[in-house]
Amino acid sequence: MERLIAANWPRAKANHERLSELWQAADPDLLLVNAHDPLLLSLAQHRQRRRTPET
């Protein structure tokens, strides 16, 4: 489906490949979140608030 609606399929495919590379790297300082998933987005925002010192 995405291929049918993507404005630039080669770019979208390259982005998917890059996200896969980042996921496989499993860097503890990197959190990949699908912002279309409200629960994952909320958890990521909460995690970021805990990690960011208050000013």
Image: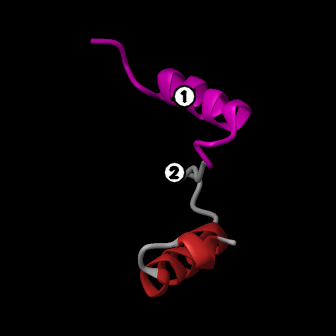
Q: Is residue 40 above or below residue 27?
A: above
The quarter of the picture where the N terminus appears is bottom right
Is there any visible trace of residue 20 in the rendered image? no
Q: Is residue 54 above or below residue 23?
A: above
Q: Is residue 39 magenta?
A: yes
Tell me what residue is drawn at x 41 percent, y 25 percent: 52
> Which residues are drawn in magenta?
34-55
**Do callouts 2 and 1 mark residues in contact (Cβ within 8 Å)?**
no
- Mark 2 or 1: the one toward you: 1
**Residue 8: horizontal and vertical position, in percent?**
42, 79
Look at mark 2 in the image and give the residue it sits on. Answer: 29
Tell me what residue is drawn at x 60 percent, y 77 percent: 4
Look at mark 1 in the image and give the residue it sits on. Answer: 45
Q: Is residue 38 left or right of residue 35?
A: right
**Residue 20: horizontal and vertical position, in percent?**
62, 75
Tell me which corner region of the image, top left, top right, bottom left or bottom right, holds residue 3. Answer: bottom right
* Distance between the alpha carbons at the discs numbered 2 and 1: 14 Å
Q: Which of marks 2 and 1 is nearer the N terminus?
A: 2
Q: Is mark 2 on a helix, strand or loop?
A: loop
**Residue 55: horizontal and vertical position, in percent?**
27, 12
